[in-house]
């Protein structure tokens, strides 16, 4: 590996992201889920929405959300129903089992988050969140979408 690659922030971020995804995958597998399905469940937790709204919220294409919802429906975690005025609109909602699974995801996220941040103190955690948001904003300006790059609620965040 070249010195430039060893010192690359992008590479360090990529390695960390891959490890995070693998750890989340292990934990999700224990719940019978695949990576990505947890995002759909958490998005639907507050209220049902259309497939289009869900795709937009998750920042994925409609066929991707359709495939995810199809799998979640087969697992009995969501239901799909035709909409009111426009029969083409499909509302997606969590089943009772889906709500229980969505609630269990909070513990999974917390566990993996603690593993991720285990070696950082409170000040470093805040700094990391701030810097990652700032980096995401830079990529967003470069034409790459980022999740809520403007949010910088670190002042209100706890040190954990």
Image (cartoon, rainbow, N blue to C red):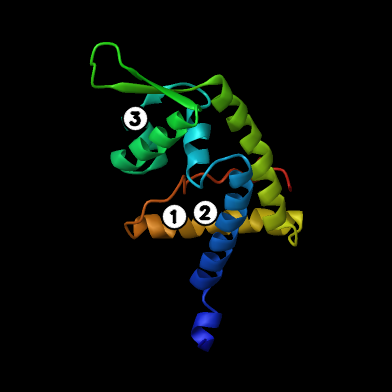
Residue under circle 1? 137
Labelled pair 1, 3 in contact (Cβ < 8 Å):
no
Label 1 – label 3 distance at C-alpha: 27 Å
Is 33 located above or below residue 46 in the figure? below
Instruction: Give percent across and percent down for residue 68.
Output: 41, 38
| Camera-nearest residue between 17 and 139 | 17
Instruction: Give percent across and percent down for residue 91.
Output: 36, 21
- The residue located at (43%, 36%) in the rendering is 71
For disc 2, the neighbor class at 10 Å (few under 14, some 14 to 19, many from 20) is some
Could you tell me if residue 155 is visible in this image?
no
Numbered mark located on residue 133 in the image = 2
- For the view shown, which residue lies furthest in the bottom direction? 2
- The residue located at (74%, 48%) in the rendering is 159
- For the view shown, which residue lies furthest in the top direction? 85
Which label sits in the foreground, 3 or 2?
3
Label 1 – label 2 distance at C-alpha: 6 Å
For disc 3, the neighbor class at 10 Å (few under 14, some 14 to 19, many from 20) is some
Would residue 127 be found to the left or right of residue 14 on screen?
Answer: right
Is 60 located above or below residue 89 in the figure? below
Which element carries disc 2, helix, strand or loop? Answer: helix
Residue under circle 3? 51
Mark 1 vs 3, N-terminal side: 3
Mark 3 vs 2, N-terminal side: 3
Which element carries disc 1, helix, strand or loop? Answer: helix
Would residue 139 be found to the left or right of residue 143 on screen?
Answer: right
Could you tell me if residue 25 is visible in this image?
yes
Indicate the quadrant where residue 140 lies.
Answer: bottom left
Label 3 – label 2 distance at C-alpha: 28 Å
Is 125 located above or below residue 14 in the figure? above
Numbered mark located on residue 37 in the image = none
Which element carries disc 3, helix, strand or loop? Answer: helix
């Amino acid at each position: 590996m070249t010195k430039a690659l060893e010192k690359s922030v992008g590479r360090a971020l990529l390695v960390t992201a891959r490890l995070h995804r693998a750890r989340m995958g292990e934990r999700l597998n224990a719940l019978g889920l695949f990576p990505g399905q947890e995002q759909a469940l958490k998005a639907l937790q507050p209220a049902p929405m259309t497939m289009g709204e869900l795709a937009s919220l998750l920042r994925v294409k409609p066929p991707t959300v359709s495939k995810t919802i199809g799998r979640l429906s087969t697992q009995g975690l969501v239901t799909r129903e035709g909409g009111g005025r426009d029969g083409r609109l499909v509302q997606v909602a969590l089943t009772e089992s889906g709500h229980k699974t969505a609630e269990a995801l909070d513990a999974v996220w917390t566990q993996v988050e603690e593993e991720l941040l285990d070696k950082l103190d409170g000040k470093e955690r805040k700094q990391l969140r701030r810097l990652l948001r700032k980096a995401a904003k830079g990529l967003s300006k470069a034409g790459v979408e980022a999740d809520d790059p403007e949010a910088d609620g670190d002042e209100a965040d706890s040190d954990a």
